[in-house]
Image (spheres, rainbow, N blue to C red):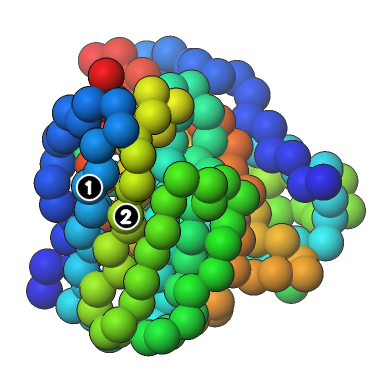
Amino acid sequence: NAGVTQTPKFRILKIGQSMTLQCTQDMNHNYMYWYRQDPGMGLKLIYYSVGAGITDKGEVPNGYNVSRSTTEDFPLRLELAAPSQTSVYFCASRPDSRYGYTFGSGTRLTVV
Amino acid sequence: KQEVTQIPAALSVPEGENLVLNCSFTDSAIYNLQWFRQDPGKGLTSLLLIQSSQREQTSGRLNASLDKSSGRSTLYIAASQPGDSATYLCAVSRGDSNYQLIWGAGTKLIIKP
C-alpha cells in the first residue's frame, strides 16, 4: 500500500516553462487536494477534487490547472512558471470529509 | 475570515518533559480540527482529528483538546522523546465548506536528549 505518491521530488524550472506535478493514490479515496507551502507559512489550497471528473478552485488557483480523469490520479499543471511559484507542493487525499488526510512527501519546485 | 495562529513558533525542551502546543482560531464555526506532524523534507502525517462535537482525542502519548467557544485547541505530548522533534501544524475545516483546511504556520519542536 503506497499511499499518496508524488513525482518528481525536486525540480528546477526556468521562467516561462511548463510542467506537470504527478499525484497518485492507491487507497480509492474520493477527495484529493493540492497544497503549496511557502517557507514559514501554513499550507494554502490550490485545487481540490471530490471525485473523478470533478475539480474546484481553492485559495490560490491562479497559474495552475488540474484534471481528475480517474479516482487514482490528480495531476497539477503549471503553465508559464513564475518565481512566485517557487514552493513545496503537497498532494493529499482522504475517503470523505469525515476522515483525516493522507499526504504525499511533496515536490520542491524552484523557478529561476 | 478564519485565521489560525500557533504560538510559539519554536519550542525547545529537555527529553522527558510533558509539553503543550497551542492553536487558536478566530471563527468558531468549524467542522473539525486536525493536528499534523511535519518532518524536514517529508510530507505531513496526520496525528489527531477532532470533530466539532468532540472535546478531545487521544493517541498514545498525544492528547488533543478542542474548545470551540474560546477558539482554542491544545496538543499535549507526554514524556517527550527526541523522536518527537518535528514541526507540528494545526488546521481547521471551515464550517461552511468541509473541503478546505485553514492552516496555522506551525510550531517547530526540538526535544534535547
Residue located 30% across and 33% down the image: A16
Q: Amino acid at mark 1?
A: Met
**The C terminus of chain A lies in which quarter of the figure?**
top left
When asked about the image quadrant of residue B20, the answer is top right
- Is residue A45 depicted above or below B74 in this figure? below
Residue that numbered label 1 is attached to: A19
Secondary structure state at the residue bearing disc 1: strand
Q: Give the answer, above or below, for where B77 lies relative to A4.
A: above
Q: Nearer the viewer, residue B35 or A47?
A: A47
Q: Residue at x 55, y 19 (%)?
A: B9
**Nearer to me, B46 or A91:** A91
Reading the image, the residue beneath label 2 is A77
User: In the picture provided, is B10 more to the left or to the right than A78?
Assistant: right
- Quadrant containing the N terminus of chain A in the rendered view: bottom left
Relative to B85, does residue A104 appear above or below in the rendering? below
Q: Is there CB contact under 8 Å for labels 1 and 2?
A: yes
- Label 2: which secondary element: strand
Question: Crowding near pointer 1: few (<14 within 10 Å), some, many (20+)?
Answer: few
Q: What chain is tagged by disc 2?
A: A
Label 1 vs 2, first from the N-terminus: 1
Judged left or right of residue A33, residue A8 is left
Q: CA distance from mark 1 to mark 2?
A: 6 Å
Whole-percent x, y for residue A94 in the image: 40, 73
As drawn, which residue projects farthest toward the right?
A: B69
Q: Residue at x 21, y 30 (%)?
A: A13
| Amino acid beneath label 2 | Arg
